[in-house]
Amino acid sequence: MSLETFIRRMPKVELHVHLEGSIQPETLLLLAERNNVELPYKTVEGLRQWYKFTNFSHFVEIYLAISACIRTPEDIEFIAREFLRGQAAQRIAHSEVTFTPYTHYAANSRIPFEDQLAALSRARQWASSELGVSVGWVLDIARSVRPLEHGLTVADWAISGMEHGVVALGLGGIEAGHPPELFEDAFSRARAAGLPAVPHAGETVGPESIRGALRSSQATRIGHGVRCLDDPELVAELRDRQIPLEVCPTSNVCLGVAPSLDEHPLPRLIDEGLYVTINSDDPPMFNTTLTDEYLRAAQMLECGADEIEEFAINAVRASLLPGATRAAMERQFHAEFAQLRAELSV
Ligand SMILES: [Zn+2]
């Protein structure tokens, strides 16, 4: 019980969570009504049923339907504020949040990127002054986007946002059939401008996708990466280089990447000496939160506060915060952990 209290109260950093995938059902209904968008369900309960995924394509279909409810910069600011309020309530001091700008530009809404960035910036400044939490935006390329030049457009947008909270270029969406190599140019352009790459890889596709991400995007971190375990040589490389993996256990179960939490590869990833961080991905869609993911990790690993603290510190160190800010946050976390552990005797 005290470990649970410790997890609830401890400071956290989240590195893999999607803004569009974090919209609560209540908010989605509100946006749909405000913008006259037809959703297949008109109640919170109905939406929760709708979120029962059968496979990754079904998930992407729902994801696009959710994105279609976002029509204006005000909608973006609204969902970002709501999201950050939820992060602050979980004691998440810093979040690196994936957002897919091309979807909101190309779909019905056609929101100019500058307006999207301005909306994100307003929410970011509000969260900093009102909630005391920070956020960095990971702008991702939807890997099924064609022609591929659109990937370069997203890279240019991300570069233009570097002074306004954009911390990385990401790669998301349907992994099968859309290898990271296709977007090498976009990642090279971002890297030349000093913008790191944090692509999804090794979620629904195996080691070749992770290798592709390491080679063609020079990934700083890997979104998911759990499928690396199929290839001992790749595991060795990830271990030697201590490339952080953004592991999202419940998401993996909901999307069929792991058969169940009991059979999730988290314990093996740890045993292999890999750099693991714990994340929630699309929390309301998977009926979870970052706090829940930590609680589940504690259960899966049958571990104590030491290991949980290590995950939290891993996330701080793998964040893309400026060095001095990151070091200060780590010191602050250690102080809070020590205080909490004394108080709770864990
Ligand atoms: Zn993701």
Image: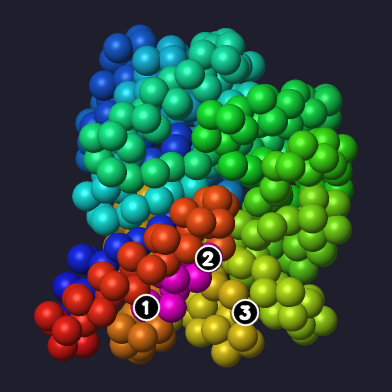
Q: Which residues are magenta?
A: 308-317
Residues tagged 1 and 2 counted as in contact (Cβ below 8 A)? no
Q: Amino acid at mark 3?
A: Leu
Q: Magenta residues: mostly which secondary structure?
A: helix
Residue 141 magenta-highlighted: no
Separation of marks 1 and 2 at Cα, in angstroms: 14 Å
Point out residue 183 in the picture as x, y percentages from the top left corner.
82, 40
Residue 225: tell me if it is visible. yes
The Cα–Cα distance between marks 3 and 2, rounded to whole angstroms, is: 14 Å
The image position of residue 16, as x and y in percent, is: 50, 53
Q: How many marks?
A: 3
Residue drawn at point x = 37 percent, y = 78 percent: 308
Label 1 secondary element: helix
Say if 9 sits above or below 30 in the image. below
Tell me the distance, in whole angstroms, between the alpha carbons under discs 1 and 3: 15 Å
At 28% from the left and 43% from the top, the residue drawn is: 132
Mark 1 residue type: Ile
Which residue does the numbered mark 1 point to in the structure image?
308
User: Residue beneath label 3, please?
Assistant: 274
Residue 201 drawn above or below residue 344:
above
Q: Tags 3 and 2 in contact by the CB under 8 Å rule? A: no
Residue 309 included in the magenta stretch of the image: yes
